[in-house]
Amino acid sequence: MLAGLVRTIRSRLLYKMLISYSILTLVPLVVVSAAFYVRSDQLLEKKETETVQQDLNATASKIDARLHEVRKLLSELGRQEAIRSLLLMDAREGIKPEDEDHRRQEAAAAELMQSELEQARNNVGEFVDNMYLINKEGAIYATDSSKRLQYVSAFGLLPFEFPNVPQWAFFTDDKRMACDLKLYVGGAAMTSETEIGMLVLTLDPAKASQLYESYERGTFYIANADNLIVSSSELSDIGNLLDSEGQGDRLVVRQKSQTSDFQYVRIATAGANELVKKQTLFALAVTLAAWAAVFITTYQILKRITHPIGRLYRLMRKAELEEYHIFPNIRGRDEIAMLCRGYNRLVTRTEQLIETNYKNELRVREAELKAIRMYINPHFLYNIMEYISVISQEPDKAKYVPDVVRKLSGIFRYSITPGGTFVPLATELQYVESFLQIHQYRFGERLQYSIVLPAMFRQAAVPRFMLQPLVENSILHGIDRLPEGGRIEIEVQEADYHLEIVIRNPSPEEEEAPDGDSSRASEKRARRGLGSGMDNVNDRIQHHFGGDYGVQLARDEGFVTVRVTIPFQIWQEESTG
């Protein structure tokens, strides 16, 4: 394909000149635009970083507000009497979980934790996952016991500076962010002896990404101070170290959380921001406009030389196809004008010679066509009258004679009605069906037929009375010779962008030639089955459309198929052929 394009360009002077001038203009413009882009990218990279930082600050504030709400809720829950009473009861010696007082206290604490969890989901967000109460012995009370804590002992090792102040864990538990609050005996110092238990609240890792869903996946992370990812839109990243060095030319912007030891990391594309892109597009538009101006100017100059040559070449190609047109509006006295005038003289003389010969040949062809049509009508009428004579002699079929005569009258009127040579295919098949119905009166069940005409072909233009001789051949050389009769199938279809009408009917088996040559017998029978009617149809089609179209007959395993191929043209009422 590329080689063909190169050959086309090399064979056209206009193309070669246009490409040469375009390159000479486009290269400097591209160099200037590229230099502008690189410089702008450098100058505005700082602006891009500031924009990302501002956006990250806003997101960090929004997330901090949610994390603060979680800490506040956990802190308030740690002051609730039901929680503290259960932990104090577990810490006393002699109190067993199966005691009635312990069961009541456990139920009250569970109800309180469930209520607080639902409130947290409504006020903070659906990403609030589960709540756990852990006594000093390590027993766990959970709002959802199916979700277990993975690192229970690790929560007890978290450092706390102030009492009743929750802390966010620097690790994840089953990929969940977790907030932990240690509870102590009221009024006592924060020592291991006064500790009575812990409250832990976890966040759903999948739903937590809703906090930063406005960012594309893989461009925002929540990490701890050691760069360990604790939340990401890609769950597989949680628990891994954030590779800040492996981001290449991308910007990595960080923002410290105000409510925890977390940091928010935003990864953005470095370099050209929207402003640079707009400026680059503007420079590109100017470049293209300048190139287009040079291109148009060059084209206008060169077309005065190349277009007359190209037009003359196209006229000569048409002349090869016997389409003769003169070169109009010749101006100037240069060599190209002289060449065009010489071509005009040649075409004019050729048209005169062709017109003389064509008119003589047309008269002969029109006379032949009239003779063909004059033959068709009497031949068709004679055959139908024969059928009426046969039907009238059978008492059980004589009653059909009036209807046969009525259908015959319509068909005959259609065949001899003056007017256009062409009719819609739907009309032609309507009278073909009437012809088949006439023969059904004679053959009865021995004759069946089907006509398939898609809606898209109903208005296709066909020569009047083209199909009747072919259908008549199907009856005479097929159905009439078979004691059991058969079915005539007519189907209209498209084949290689042409209209194809297929007529198929059963036929007696082929006779073998005396010398045993079955191919000669097949050819002989095919010629005998062609008949004058089919010859006439073939001549009419080739007269109207040329030798590439016509009628083809084929025999295959007891069936004869006739294919009529004509151009697909829409019938116009004023068409006269």
Image (cartoon, helix red, strand yellow):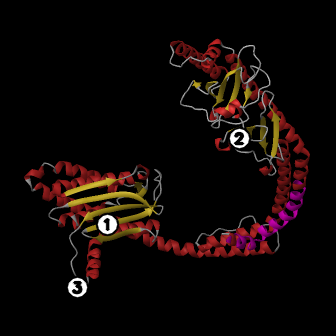
Asked whether residue 379 appears in the rendered view, the answer is: no
Q: Left or right? Give the position of 526 relative to 141.
A: left
To which quarter of the image does residue 539 belong?
bottom left
SS for callout 1: strand
Residue type at the position of mark 1: Thr
Residue type at the position of mark 2: Glu
SS for callout 3: loop
Label 1 crowding class (10 Å Cα cut-off): few <14, some 14-19, many 20+? many
Disc 2 versus disc 3: nearer the observer: 2
Question: Viewer-proximal residue, 160 or 74?
Answer: 160
Residue type at the position of mark 3: Gly
Disc 3 versus disc 1: nearer the observer: 3
Q: Which mark is residue 561?
A: 1
CA gap between label 2 and label 3 equals: 82 Å
- The outermost residue toward the front is 94
Residue extent of the magenta highlight: 4-33
Q: Which residue is mark 2?
A: 216
Label 2 crowding class (10 Å Cα cut-off): few <14, some 14-19, many 20+? few
Can residue 472 be found in the magenta stretch? Answer: no
